[in-house]
Amino acid sequence: MFLSRFIVGLLFLVALCVPIGAAQSAQPCSETPSTDVLDSRCDLPLPPRLEAANLPQETQSAAKIPLTVLSGTPVRIALDQRTRISRVGEPVRGKVVQAVYAFDQQVIPAGSLAQGYVTKIDPVSAKKRSMAYANGNFSPFHKYEITFDMLTFPDGKRLPIKTTVAPGTAEVVHLVSDPAKGKERNAAARAVDNAKQEGKDQVHDAVTEIDSPGRIERLKEMVLARSPYRRQFIERGTRFNASLDNPLDFGVAMRTPEQLAAIGSAPLNDTLLHARLVLPVSSATATHGTPVLALLTEPLFSADHHLLFPADTRLIGQVVQVKPARHLHRNGVLRFVFEHIETPDGALSSMQGSLEGMEVDREANMKLDEEGGTRATDSKTRYLSTGLTVAMAAVAARPDVDHGTTDPAGDPTVRTGAGESGFGLAGALLSYAAKSPPVSIAFGAYGASASIYSNFLSRGHDVVLPKDTPMEIGFGNPHPGAAASNSQEPKHPR
């Protein structure tokens, strides 16, 4: 009986204390919170409902966008100084010539310093060395590999990276389908392009220009290339695609629904999309209908600064015309169009886009026509060079008695020229020292026949667009020629 009365009394006292405590908690707290006191009665968190009520409405619904550069993304780097290829570990240095974006934000600025080193120098095979010696080249070039492992941003921030670097391009040229069309783009389309720089430095405005070798330097290199002995260098301005082996994390960006509402909307016609090829395409292997895939390298904004397509948006197309290279020096032709665009979240929409520009190796000898098609071309000097070698061989074959002279060794100038046309500087020296008309005739005939075969009888050049080729794709109606090619399937190559 006593125990039951004690329990009832205890419950009665608890019931009286609860209203008092509630009333005290409702009064303003006069105690100043202190970070040194862990059990302060006033340092109490607000209820969750009150916390949400105190936050701005746009913050509550903002989306978290990870700013991640995926592995495999290329960083385009141009060497800013001449580099000797002599040993593994030789340092190389260049600058980023195209900014890298994550979603809609620039994360690797153009102009950033890239540092690396030579990782491998392959020995020259016996076959290649023998062929080089036969052509008067006693110092054949070694294949090499380099890597870039450190980026230094313009603000001094350093970022270690791990990359796989593709072979470099010594001279890059920018091809356009119709130069006049680029100048006549309407003001609205230009406003779309200019909208990208909302508080950011733009790729084409911020790039520190690194010139490729000029005409004088190229002439010197051509003369040195005829030398039997020469050192191997990577020339200033050589461009490399350094693909990231690991993803790079640059944090998270907050974007409101209003900032993301226009994603997937179609831009104005004639808007240029900057992209890169995901897979290589070649006229030697492609057929009608071969898929073509590209990724946007820059986000696209509308004229009123709304994001339309973030970086890494996929462009999906197909080959509509192809002709492989054939004998008698007939060159290849390749044309493709883009028909769909897919945002990173999977939203797919139709588009009609064609190639308006791209960056390629000068030695590839390619041309972009007004219809967006790519074709391989030949150097205009092939007629001159072949004519000179044939003329030199003909002169060397005429005995000196026809010239009214009696020198049995022949004209020294003719001997030297004939040897040079066949085997370069080494052939010129050998022919001059031999003082033998048959040797000069043999050198001249070899040079003439080799020039005729390589410039007129051999298989032509194919159009080869390597992986990560930078491209400019016109968004809008396709070229009339591209539409016609799409409706007429070309003949299948034999």
Image (spheres, rainbow, N blue to C red):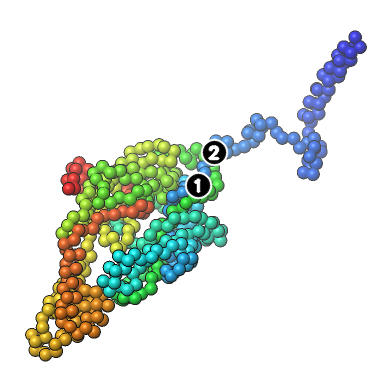
Q: Nearer the viewer, residue 12 or 306?
A: 12
Instruction: Quote the CA–CA distance across marks 1 and 2.
Output: 18 Å
At horizontal 87% and vertical 12% (from top left) the residue drawn is: 4
Foreground of the two, 473 or 163: 163
**Furthest residue to the bottom?**
406
Q: Is residue 373 visible?
A: no
Residue 272 position, x and y percent, is 35, 50
Q: Tell which residue pokes out farthest to the right in this image.
A: 2
* Image quadrant occupied by the N terminus: top right
Q: Secondary structure at mark 2?
A: loop
Work out which residue is located at the far front of the displayed protein and give it.
Answer: 126
List x then y, in percent, for residue 453: 17, 65
Answer with the quarter of the image where residue 209 lies.
bottom left
Residue at 48% in and 62% down: 116
> Going by the image, does 161 lie left or right of 446?
right
Q: In the figure, 253 relative to 48: above or below?
A: below
Query: Does the rendering let one see residue 415?
Result: yes
Residue beneath label 2, please? 62
- Please provide percent x and percent y for residue 452: 16, 67
Label 1: state its secondary structure: strand
Q: Could you say where residue 319 lies in the image, as x and y percent from the top left? A: 26, 45
The residue where tag 1 is placed is 68
What number is the disc on residue 230?
none
- Quarter of the rendering containing residue 363: bottom left
The count of marks equals 2
Tell me the amino acid under the disc marked 1: Thr
Q: Amino acid at mark 2?
A: Ala
Q: Is residue 44 above or below residue 366?
A: above
Count neighbours of disc 1 (C-alpha within 10 A) and say few if under 14, some if 14 to 19, many if 20 or more.
some
